[in-house]
Amino acid sequence: MKLHYLNSLFLLVIILDLSTNIYGLSSSQLVPKKILKPLLPPPEALLSIGHYHGTCPDAEGIISQKVAAWIKKDPTLAPSIIRLHFHDCAIRGCDASILLNHLGSERKAFESRSLRGFQLIDEIKVELEKRCPRTVSCADILTAAARDATILAGGPFWEVPFGRKDGKISVAKEANLVPQGHENITGLIGFFQERGLDMLDLVTLSGSHTIGRSTCYSVMNRIYNFNGTGKPDPSLSIYYLKMLRKRCKKDLDLVHLDVITPRTFDTTYYTNLKRKVGLLSTDQLLFSDVRTGPFVEAFATQPFLFTSQFAVSMVKLGNVQVLTRPNEGEIRVNCNYVNHV
């Protein structure tokens, strides 16, 4: 019996050895390996230009018409919509969290007090809910509205990929993460990199300051007490400093971001930086910092380079941390509130 058992064991070893030789496998390769899960595509890969073609074909047209009507009545709304889109994407990604209107939301934060354009987005949403109920997200509306506002201000066109869903969380204290105009360049570069954007995107998207206004709160330290010195920022031209002191009597007074062509989408913003008339210290630092200065120089002298890159960088901004998977987010019925179950 013992001999029979040993013979059987010997045959089993021979069979295993033959099988490994036949299939070119070593005994180490027969050890079961952990099965790897297939890699999922990045969330932005699930966005598409034709996302609403079958479910709400008039969505883009409705958004464009509404944006055009509002900006015709109030041209200052164009830069406000672009800014609102940036503030949304900067916190928790482009998920319309900035639109949630409840106690303790980003929208209620001190840093968000000068944001505008909420009523326009609400009007667009009401119209889309009539045409295509529970189909078009608030995040997509805001992203497309920013593109249309850019065009109406004289900026470039780009195709907006759709399919974002709306987030359910909005926290006021997170709004202070959005750059306020007094950060250093290293901090700004880090902020952008954390969101999948690079130095070129930083300089390019800052070019949206070619239109629009800022509250004087953002520049009071530059013109009166720079870095606690009790003196103005030495990088400001004397002429510009005098003008700002005349304009900025109170924190909530408004001043143009581009002092030369404030209503035209152009590259004067970059030439202003070379002349030391950038409004925000973060603007002026883009020119003086060796890492970002070459991009400023390039855009100042090559307008087409700026407008073409602006379109590219705005698409990248609109793709930041988007919610696109089946178990993520929702399509809000009202952009101000999460849906009730």
Image (cartoon, helix red, strand yellow):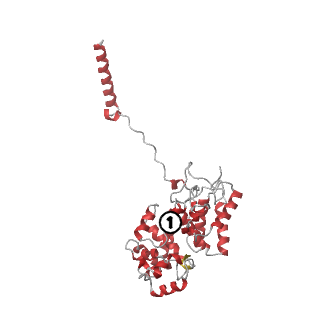
Q: Is residue 275 left or right of residue 9?
A: right
How far from the left and from the top, in percent, is residue 111?
54, 68
Location of residue 114 with respect to 99 vertically, above or below: below
How far from the left and from the top, in percent, is residue 92?
52, 59
- Residue sticking out furthest to the right: 130
- Residue sticking out furthest to the top: 1
Location of residue 119 with respect to 53 vertically, above or below: below
Q: Amino acid at mark 1?
A: Asn
Q: How many residues crowd mark 1 within 10 Å: few (<14), some (14–19), many (20+)?
A: some
How far from the left and from the top, in percent, is residue 218?
50, 75
Residue 315 can be seen, yes or no = no
Q: Which of the 4 image quarters holds residue 194?
A: bottom left
Q: Is residue 132 left or right of residue 316?
A: right
Q: Which of the 4 image quarters holds residue 64?
A: bottom right
Q: How many marks?
A: 1
Q: Is residue 256 left or right of residue 273?
A: right
Location of residue 164 with respect to 257 vertically, above or below: above
How far from the left and from the top, in percent, is residue 99?
60, 62
Residues 3 and 58: in front is 3
Q: Which of the 4 image quarters holds residue 74?
A: bottom right
Residues 10 and 254: in front is 254
User: Quadrant location of the N terminus?
Assistant: top left
Residue 307 can be seen, yes or no = yes
The structure residue drawn at horizontal position 69% and vertical position 57%, both measured from the top left corner, is 129
Q: On the image, numbered disc 1 is attached to which residue?
A: 176
Q: Secondary structure under badge 1? A: helix
